[in-house]
Each structure stands twice: as structure tokens, then as C-alpha cells.
Image (cartoon, helix red, strand yellow):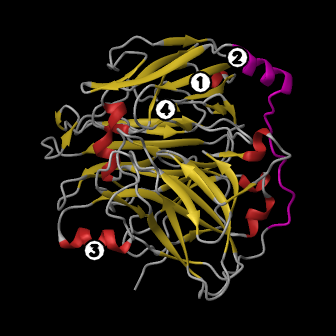
Amino acid sequence: MTPSISARHGLPSLALALLCCSCSSFAQQNLPTIPVAASPVILDAVTDGQTGKASFAYQGKEIPPVIHASPGQTIQVDYRNHLTSHSGEQCTHGSCSDMTNLHFHGLHVSPQAPQDDVLTMMAMPGESLHYRVEIPGDQPPGLYWYHTHPHGENYRQLLDGMSGAIIIDGMERYVPEVRSLRERLLILRDTELEQDAPSLAEAKRVELPATGCSRGGEAPERIFTVNGVIRPSIDIAPGERQFWRIVNASPDLYADLAIDASTMKVIARDGMPLAYHDPSRPFEMLEHILVPPAGRVEAIITGPPAGTHASLRTRCVDTGPDGDPNPAMVLADLNTAAAPHRIPASSTAKLPPALHKRIAAPLLAHLKSTEPAYIVRFTEDKHGFYINGKAFEPSDAPMLTVNIGDYQHWRVINETGELHPFHIHQVHFLPYATNAVAAENPDWLDTVNVPVGGTVDMVMDFTDPIIRGMSVFHCHLIQHEDKGMMAKILFQ
């Protein structure tokens, strides 16, 4: 019997609620609601006794919790490193030492300890880190995530599944209809394929082709899971509308998402409601959407007609002549035989007003017309991966310093033969042109795809004083980041 994905609805707005989806049953877990004033969440990094892989554990189960919070609250996490000191896994520069830490991806919070500090906060086996992440009152509501970020060992930990979702509540302030919709969280992670019968069966199950569509021509080595399950079934009645929140937690697989013979009503990307910067544009109807590694999409999905077979799938992504295979595959099936899910009548209380951050049209036009204030250049060779000719070292000085309080025009140039997703901590940006061609409806993102041999021009939002401190930007193909494609930036 194919497992079904669990749903969440009606969590208290003044609490941190932690929920888990079981990797085997997908049954909803009745985990506790933890008040903000209570003790910190205790999250453990552990080594699985059977597989030898690293994972997160919460309350004794190897299931990463989903953290819910509201703007203005504080996320407290006690992160304890119980990984083995004699790892059998291989990292970028040899055997893994199993150092680890956390990054709170996409949140507009301080990069200084004890908040989103990925540079100086590091725990070796037997050590602990104590995070206190203060979410600003104007944090856009939406889907964010947390994951490990130890330079040189990050790829292995993310591939092992050391990641979890963060939901900042309040999306109904921008799209009121989501209050009455069943909500689903879909976390896309990888599972590795071996040359054996079980792996061949898994590849066949997701309808994996023999080769990817990349010009490199290599055979696919991994497939996606959804909340830890290969090709689950999602109950959705014909015509039923549901609110789906999807995060691509893969270290390097792209997901070009589509639902058979259907469109998605996209309302947020990378945790940013479309209406946050443009109230006149609360949604966009799309037949498919490219979600790079670390990207998120939130959309309203309508159940297909009765008797229709439909699946959520990723289309093949050509990652370039030097890129890795990124094949098409089925992610999940939509079960239209399910009965409609009834949501209890929600409160009729008036919602608090939505916050909006508009950028004035003359300012935006001026930024677009000026030369870039900074250029990020991605290069690579057989020895490593580089930003502006430099491979990252933890002891590096900042590559640049930015004075807080303004917007800047940046350009990212990809001088390699493969795709690279650009990501910067602490802020969102507006990628308004690709290869000098203006985007029709650009969205504010924290991770953007940079095409092979191409460019992306963007407006960086450096206006918030909360982000002061040493931060980083990097390629979010995590092997590339581990091998040097990262740099420090000092916000002052």
C-alpha cells in the first residue's frame, strides 16, 4: 500500500510547533506545541547505527522537526553533536571529521552568534551549540529551512538528509484563501542508486530514463524522495484545492516541477509572498516552475477531474556539458479517489494588516540603468571551484564590505560549462534580467539559477540593519561550495 503524505492545519500562532512526517508511514505525528518561553528545542546530530550515515534526531527519532514560528518570535535550538568521532564516510578532503552546525536559510536575521553564524559556530563530536534566532517583526511569512553548513563536509551531511523545514506563519495575510485549505509540506531529498536489484526497482518506480538530458551524458546516480518516501500518493479529491509548500533540500539536484495536465497557482517563492513587494500581484499561474537546490515554492493546487491519473513530476534539466545528470522522474501520484478533506470553519476575526515593502519605480529603474556595484564571477577547473578567482578558506578576510542601508545592482557571471545556483545569506534579491534579457515578472528570491556561460543581473536588498556582521554568498551546489565556491561578505 502506498503511503500518503500527512497534513497540518490550525497550529497556534503564538508558539513554536514541531511536527514530523514519518519517513515510513507519513502518518501525522502528535508532537508537542512548545511555547516561545519554554526550554529550547533539543536537536541532535547522530550517526545511524545501521547505515553509518549522519542524521538529525528529535525526541529520540531520526526525523527532522518542522519549526513553526511567527514574525517577532525567537527560535531557540540546542544543537548537540553526537556524531561518531570515527566516521566511515568520505568528505571533500578525505574522511569526515563530523564537525557540524546550522544555517537558517532565507531568514533575515543576524549572521552573528548565537544566530545565523555559519563561520565561527562549529561543534565537533561531543560538543553543543546554542542558537537564539530572533525573527524580525517584518519577516515575510512563508517556507524557509534549516540545514548543516560545515565547510568541506556540508555535501555529505545534506546528502544524508540533515535538513528540516521552517514555516513562518502569516501567509493568510497575503492570500486569505489559504486559511480554508488543507496544507501539505513536501520536502524533496535524494536517495542514492546502486548497481543492484533494489536500486533498479526504485529507478523503474519513478520512471527514471537511462540517461539524463544534460550534454554530459552520464547515467543518473540519485532520485528524489518526498518526505523520505519514493513516489508516495497524495490524497486530493477532484476539484479540491490544497496549499502545498515544497522545498528542494537536495545538495545538487534541480526540480523543474509540474503536475500532469494542470497549472499551479504560485503565491510565494523562497519564503517571499509575491504580494510582499507587489500587492497587485498576489499569485501567478504556471504550468511548471524550476526550483534549484535550496529553492522553495508555495502554491495552491487543484485536484484533477475524477478518474484522471495525474502525477507531480520533475522535468529533465539540462545542467550543461560539464554538469551532472538531472533526469525527469515522477515524484508523487495524486489520488483523486480520496474524499474531500473538510477544514473546520476558521475564525472570522479580522486578519492583521499585511506588511508590504515596495521599491519605488524610479529607484528600480535607476539601479537597472547603472553599472553593477559588484560582479560575482563563477569559474572552475580540475582543482576546484572559485569566486572571482579565489577558492574559499575559513581564514579568509571578507571579499567585500557593504554598508547597510541601500539597494545595489549586482551581476553574477557563470564562466563554466554547468549551471550554478547563486545564494546569499541574510537577504533576498530581485533577479530582473538573465543574459541581459529582462524577466517578464521577476520574483524576489534568495537562490537563483545562473545559466551556462551566462549572466544574471539583480537588485540586492541591503537596507535592513539587522543583518550587520560577517556573512557569506556561494554556489548552492554543495560540492562546489565545499570545494571553494564561497566567499565572505561583511555587512556594516
Q: Is residue 472 left or right of residue 380?
A: right
Determine which residue is flagged by label 1. 467
x and y, in percent, of residue 203 in the image:
32, 68
What residue appears at the point 32 percent right and 30 percent down from the top-left corner? 151
Task: Give the amino acid type for the residue marked by disc 4 in the picture.
Answer: Asp
x and y, in percent, of residue 179 in the image:
75, 64
Distance, label 2 to label 3, CA atoms, is 54 Å
Distance, label 3 to label 4, CA atoms, is 41 Å
Distance, label 1 to label 3, CA atoms, is 48 Å
**Chain-order first, disc 2 or disc 3:** 3
Where's the N terminus, which quadrant?
Answer: bottom left
**Residue 379's quadrant in the figure?**
top left
**Residue 258's quadrant in the figure?**
bottom right
Nearer the observer, disc 1 or disc 3? Answer: 3
Which one is in front, 427 or 383? 383
> Is label 2 in contact with label 3 (beta carbons under 8 Å)?
no
Determine which residue is flagged by label 2. 405
Mark 2: few/some/many CA within 10 Å (<14, 14-19, 20+): few
x and y, in percent, of residue 80 in the image:
32, 43
Element class at badge 1: helix
Q: Is residue 3 above or below residue 466?
A: below
Mark 1: few/some/many CA within 10 Å (<14, 14-19, 20+): many
Q: Give the magenta-colored segment's residue range.
A: 347-370
Q: Is residue 164 above or below residue 426?
A: below
x and y, in percent, of residue 318 in the image:
45, 48
Determine which residue is flagged by label 3. 201
312 part of magenta stretch: no
Q: Which mark is residue 116?
A: 4
Distance, label 2 to label 1, CA atoms, is 10 Å
Which one is in front, 127 or 438? 438
Q: Is residue 172 above or below residue 99?
A: below
**Chain-order first, disc 1 or disc 3:** 3
